Amino acid sequence: MKFAIINDMHIGPVESGHYKGVQRKLVSESGRLVEEFVDRMNAQERPEFVVNLGDSIEDVNSRDIDIQSFKKSIALLSGLKMPEYSMVGNHDVKTLTQEEVAKILGIEQMYYSFDRGAYHFVVLSFEMTGNHRDGDINAKLPAKQLEWLKKNLSKTSKSTIVFSHYGLADDDMKDNFWFENAPHLGHLANKLEIREILEESGKVKAVISAHQHWNRMFVHNGIPYFTVTSLVENFNNDGVPSEAHTIVILEDNKISLDVKGNDPAKYEFTFVL
């Protein structure tokens, strides 16, 4: 089975995306790059489906503009000739609620699951706690979603792949442009509790995340945790976007990730049977 991932598209006003005095997200390139991704999926890669790991927009503290950016992201991806599954990122819910995002996307809620072939796929969401204005914020899976996750995994007999916008691995964020000085902002705050649920199910074969804007792989208790970089990351601070998307190959006994673009990476993991 082959599927594709796009993430951290950061659709928004072209002047946005700055951090530490650098336009680290090349928002002006996002529309073109999404169009090229869609063309490549339809004409060349032809995956069974596409997963959007969140941060579809670059929020600008304006509900009206953020809604416009969301609608643009949906329109850009609408040309895909295969199913597309979207999830929510932190920038998507700065001015909008999860419920509002779900309504815009035309789905019931922002955490859900689906089956494809021999595999079960779980899409996680999160809730933000704290105050954005002073930076005292965390993202976590609320108790209701934790219970849903347990029940969802208990009901499937299939090998399972989990998608989470935020990281679940133990990564100290050293040398990460965005999170080195605030590593807690790169992970779900209750990641250990979530990992315990995944491990106890005996069904989860891999977890794939976004958000951190780099490529990583860690293995915890037999489960690989992959992080893939942003579509528009100005990764060398030279005005060249990463142009990233990821092709995932699932076989009975292993998973392979190929991060395409200007900041490539390849990972392979043989499942513990």
Image (tube, grey):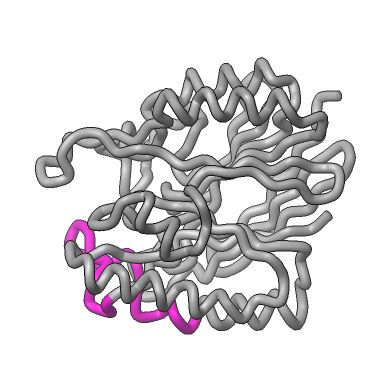
- Give the residues drawn in magenta, as a range: 13-33
| Left or right for 263, reference 58 | right
Residue 112 image point, x, y percent: 58, 44
Q: Position of residue 238 (x, y in %)?
A: 35, 72
**Residue lying furthest right:** 252
| Res 21 → quadrant | bottom left
Task: Tell me where residue 160 sits by quadrant.
Answer: top right
Q: Is residue 34 above or below residue 263?
A: below
Identity of the residue drawn at 60% across and 35% down: 225
The residue furthest left is: 134
Residue 221 versus residue 71 in the image, above or below: above
Image quarter where the C terminus lies is: top right
42 in relation to 211, above or below: below
Residue 117 lies, in percent from the top left, at 85, 49
Q: Is residue 204 above or below residue 260?
A: above
Residue in front for this viewpoint, 93 or 182: 93
Give residue 121's quadrant in the image. top right
Q: Quadrant of the N terminus?
A: bottom right
Within the magenta stretch, is there residue 272? no
Residue at left 56%, top 62%? 6
Quick check: is 15 in the magenta stretch?
yes
Locate residue 78 relative to residue 181 in the image: left or right.
right
Question: Which residue shows up at 29% across the image and 34% down it?
Answer: 138
Residue 90 placement (x, y as % from top left):
34, 50
- What's the residue at 32%, 32% (across, down)? 184
For residue 65, side relative to residue 257 (left or right) = left
